[in-house]
Image (cartoon, rainbow, N blue to C red):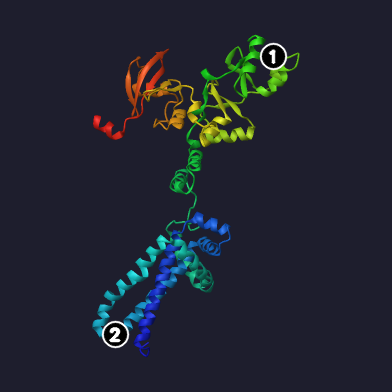
Amino acid sequence: MSEIPTGLLFGLLGVLIVLSAFFSGSETALMTVNRYRLRHLKEQGHPGATRAFRLLERPDRLIGLILLGNNFINILATSVATVLALRLGGETGLALMPFILTPLILIFAEVTPKTLAALHPEKLAFPAAFIYVPLLTLTYPFVWVVNLIANGLLRAMGVSTEDPANQVLSQEELRSVVTEAGALMPQRYHQMLLSVLDLGAATVNEIMIPRQEVEAIDLDAPMEEIVRELRTSHYTRIPIYQGDIDNIVGIVHIRRAMHALLEEDFTKERLMSVAEPPYFIPESTPLNRQLLHFQRERRHLGLVVDEYGDFMGLLTLADVLEEIVGEFTTDPQDNIPNVHPQGDGSWLVAGQANVRELVRAFQWELPTDGPRTLNGLIVEHMENIPEPGTSLLLNGYPVEILQTQDNTVKMTRIWPSIPKAKRSGEE
């Protein structure tokens, strides 16, 4: 090397630093590239993404190749720098060489290329993949030996090398991804995706129609009353019970019942012949699982029962779908019969109003992981049955109890929430 001109050695050192920068930057780019976007581009036939995806299927081989090349380049650069130092400064130059070469490699071959690669991984990862695929083929014996020793050491320490990169996202991690991607999609679809992820956190008893509000037909009632209820019903399917609503014997589809009504010999027995057997749902069933049950059983309506088999309420397929897509009306507030807006900006809200429906329709910040009704929320907050005229601050919303009956809150008045800053000042 002593016969090589000094200018050529400087040029060689510069080339080696550039090659070191390529290895360092491409390593960061390939390791930080978005795996899901990479998979998507691969499925679209992107050549660079296809090669990068193939390299990342065995990251141990890729890392072995990069480090093998990078270390070889850095050692060679050190040798060239040593010759230059001896030639230009003798022993003094040799002593100063580490203090000059280290900043050069650190700045130009490590920090700068790695920072650039972290900011724009695809711009470096895809072109680098075209170089690494044939280079890995050429150097495979050396890489294989390095990986054999390294993987053997890892196995000796109890580290498995079979699945080095677990790419499966948990539900919370997937929710974070969807939340961060909110600006890339319409707000409506973004909210729908979040609702799908949250579906498993709610159970059927949180959104069911309680038994007190269920419209049903009593088979023991006079025939004229049964016919009148069938003709005036606003629902597509109605439960049929005998004697007591806990004894539901079928679910009748109004359209089938109307066809049967046209017959001259329409009787209760004929009504039962067009009814479906009741379909019961445990009250603790998660909504995502119940949605699958509805699909598998080809059902649109289920009867919610508690652990003792007592009838608790009614759940429809539409109720579950509304948790995902929102109310099936132009204004979701129209579907809340227990809420009446007042001229002073307050709302009259019945105690039986469903908390989740209030949150969904009015965007009120009320807790949905506790009691299902507003009455239950107030009683839990007060820890007793409040008297009419009682006022309280429920999660930032001023609430006045207007009417109580049978140990329950029947009617309340709710005002808009107090800002947190003002709330803290008052406290």
Q: Position of residue 37 (x, y in %)?
A: 50, 55
Q: Residue furthest right?
A: 264
**Point 50% across, 54% down: residue:** 36
**Which residue occupies 38% across, 21% down?**
413
Q: Nearer the viewer, residue 35 or 264?
A: 264
Of the two numbered discs 2 and 1 in the rendering, the one whose residue sits closer to the viewer:
1
Does residue 152 appear in this view?
no
Q: Is residue 133 above or below residue 304?
A: below
Q: What secondary structure is found at the residue carrying circle 2? A: helix
Instruction: Give me the C-alpha separation between circle 2 and circle 1.
Output: 109 Å
Q: Secondary structure at mark 1?
A: helix
Look at 49% across and 41% down and name the residue there: 188
Percent coordinates x, y for residue 338 in the rendering: 46, 21
Residue to which mark 2 is pinned:
86
Q: Is residue 182 above or below residue 107?
A: above
The residue at which mark 1 appears reads as 268
Q: Is residue 422 left or right of residue 38?
A: left
The circle drawn on residue 90 is none
Q: Amino acid at mark 2?
A: Leu
Q: Earlier in the sequence, mark 2 or mark 1?
A: 2
Which amino acid, by three-letter code, is at mark 1?
Lys
Image location (x, y in percent) of residue 35: 49, 56
* Residue 25 versus residue 36 in the image, above or below: below
| Outermost residue toward the bottom in this view | 3
Q: Residues within 10 Å of mark 2 (few under 14, many from 20)?
A: some
Q: For residue 15, say whether it is visible.
A: yes
Image quadrant occupied by the N terminus? bottom left
Horizontally, is 102 left or right of 404 in the view?
A: left
